[in-house]
């Protein structure tokens, strides 16, 4: 028996698959077992044609290909090359078991890439499951950015067979490149960031409170809701926030590249986190993922490790807003269908913007609001209290004034975000403040007696929920980090309380 390594995609994660072969005495046959899809079963004809077109003589034996584990559905044409090599090299004295092989075969033996190859390799690389990989030559320019892996590229089946027999003249070796971005290391973990701000906070005049809240939001990944009149700068802040987010680890960078690939976008391999902004008319399936037979990833899955921005928040469908509560709280979503159940990670920063009323002029000092009290109440009631309870920072933005001036650039804000990030990681937190579990809050967000007394008074006065209390503590911890303070002071807690949601 010979064996090669391959993989299949389940949701957004690769499941390792061992491709095993035996050629035994019996009536000549060619069978593939192990819950193979139609595309894999059709590989028999592609493999036969590719081998016979290149002067290979099929032995008069019973050929059995097993895809293990046998209880996992496999799909994709990238199994072709593995199957062909196991048959062609059955009598060769070579160990194939440590190699991962991906590639679709043409009828003449040409090795081609397919759409699943890239996310498969990225997912396996992220989990440190492979070191040596054989891929189509045309894929080398893409996979070379994946670190710590040796890649071999082949154009033809004959080249792959010759390589495993010891002749490597016609293959192309590609060592992975180092990640070339600014970085720093804390507790043996390297964090990558970029200093590129195509749109800048310097363009936003005034709105100092909103910009401060945006800084706190980015520093700890705290969910943010901006409310204000049309044109006051809500979307401008949300889009610029994208470029001052905390740095990413190498694993997060590979995850971002994998999601780009699944979204049909050429991965850029930069530390820029994702930014997804679905329109308010989007259906629940497009936002959360779905499909009648195979669950596809949606906008919140593609926003993992980045920003999910909902503009015109109250105009989103009620089922979308209520279903968003689970991924905001649990940082994951499970999609169940008759044929499949898939779980996606959804650790994103949620940013939302809304007008104060349907016409948008309720807070305006220059224009009259045209809405009745009933229309305003109906508009705001589209957002339930359980949903709003998952928002960390609420900011009511002011009207634009001719005397407003620019204050902070994105570069200066990003420096503060990086500083706060270093402080959080130096405490050996597993995540940023906004994503801390309840069990970690007492350890990292502890309050002294005087500050705790102020929080207790606020709980009684403002009728804060348990979730709101924890969020206020986490926000206060981020403000303390920005202020270079080891403990949460009274001023930090009071600022965190100022961002609480007011009663409507």
Image: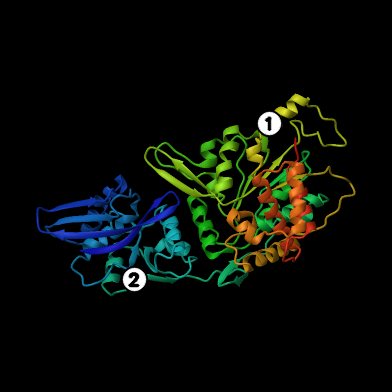
The crowding category of the residue bearing disc 1, from other C-alpha atoms within 10 Å (few below 14, some 14 to 19, many at least 20), is few
Residue 480 at x, y = what percent?
73, 61
Considering the image in quadrants, where does the C terminus appear? top right
Q: CA distance from mark 1 to mark 2?
A: 67 Å
Please give left or right for residue 336 compared with residue 80 in the image: right
Tag 1's secondary structure? loop
Q: Which mark is residue 219?
A: none
Residue, disc 1: 381
Considering the image in quadrants, where does the N terminus appear? bottom left
Q: Residue at x 59, y 46 (%)?
A: 328
The crowding category of the residue bearing disc 2, from other C-alpha atoms within 10 Å (few below 14, some 14 to 19, many at least 20), is some
First-in-chain label (1 vs 2): 2
Q: Residue furthest left?
A: 26
Residue, disc 2: 170
Name the residue nearer the viewer: 156 or 319. 319
Report if residue 464 is visible in the image.
yes
């Amino acid at each position: 028996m010979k064996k090669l390594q391959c993989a299949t995609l389940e949701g957004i994660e690769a499941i390792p698959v061992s491709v095993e072969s035996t050629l035994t005495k019996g009536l000549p046959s060619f069978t593939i077992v192990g819950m193979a899809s139609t595309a894999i079963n059709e590989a028999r004809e592609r493999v036969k044609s590719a081998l016979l077109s290149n002067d290979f003589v099929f032995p008069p034996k019973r050929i059995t290909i097993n895809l293990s584990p046998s209880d996992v559905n496999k799909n994709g044409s990238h199994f072709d090359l593995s199957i062909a090599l196991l048959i062609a090299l059955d009598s060769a004295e070579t160990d194939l078991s440590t190699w991962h092989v991906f590639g679709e075969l043409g009828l003449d033996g040409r090795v081609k890439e397919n759409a699943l190859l890239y996310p498969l390799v990225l997912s396996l690389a992220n989990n440190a499951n492979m070191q040596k990989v054989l891929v189509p030559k045309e894929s080398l320019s893409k996979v070379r950015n994946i670190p710590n892996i040796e890649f071999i590229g082949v154009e033809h089946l004959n080249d792959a067979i010759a390589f495993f027999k010891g002749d490597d003249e016609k293959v192309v070796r590609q060592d992975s490149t180092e990640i070339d971005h600014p970085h720093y290391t804390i507790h043996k973990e390297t964090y990558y960031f970029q200093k590129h701000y195509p749109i800048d906070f310097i363009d936003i005049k005034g709105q100092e409170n909103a910009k401060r809240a945006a800084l706190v939001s980015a520093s700890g990944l705290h969910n943010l809701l901006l409310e204000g009149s049309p044109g006051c700068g809500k979307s401008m802040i949300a889009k610029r926030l994208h470029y001052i987010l905390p740095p990413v680890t190498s694993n997060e960078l590979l995850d971002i590249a994998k999601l780009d690939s699944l979204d049909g976008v050429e991965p850029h391999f930069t530390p820029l986190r994702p930014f997804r902004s679905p329109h308010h008319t989007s259906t629940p399936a497009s936002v959360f993922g779905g499909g009648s037979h195979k669950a596809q990833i949606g906008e919140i899955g593609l926003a993992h490790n980045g920003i999910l921005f909902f503009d015109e928040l109250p105009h989103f469908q009620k089922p979308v807003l209520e279903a968003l509560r689970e991924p905001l709280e649990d940082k994951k979503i499970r999609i169940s269908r008759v044929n499949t159940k898939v779980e996606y990670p959804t650790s994103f920063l949620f940013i939302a913007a809304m007008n104060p009323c349907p016409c948008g002029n309720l807070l305006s000092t220059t224009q009259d609001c045209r809405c009745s009290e009933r229309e305003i109440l109906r508009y705001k009631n589209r957002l339930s209290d359980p949903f709003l309870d998952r928002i960390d920072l609420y900011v009511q933005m002011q009207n634009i004034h001719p005397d407003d001036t620019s204050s902070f650039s994105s570069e200066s804000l990003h420096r503060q975000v990086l500083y706060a990030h270093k402080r959080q990681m130096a405490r050996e937190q597993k995540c940023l403040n906004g994503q801390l579990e309840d069990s970690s809050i007492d350890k990292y967000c502890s309050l002294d007696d005087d500050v705790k007394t102020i929080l207790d008074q606020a709980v009684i006065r403002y009728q804060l929920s348990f979730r709101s209390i924890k969020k206020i503590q986490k926000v206060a911890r981020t403000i303390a980090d920005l202020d270079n303070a080891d403990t949460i002071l009274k001023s930090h807690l009071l600022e965190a309380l100022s961002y609480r949601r007011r009663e409507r």
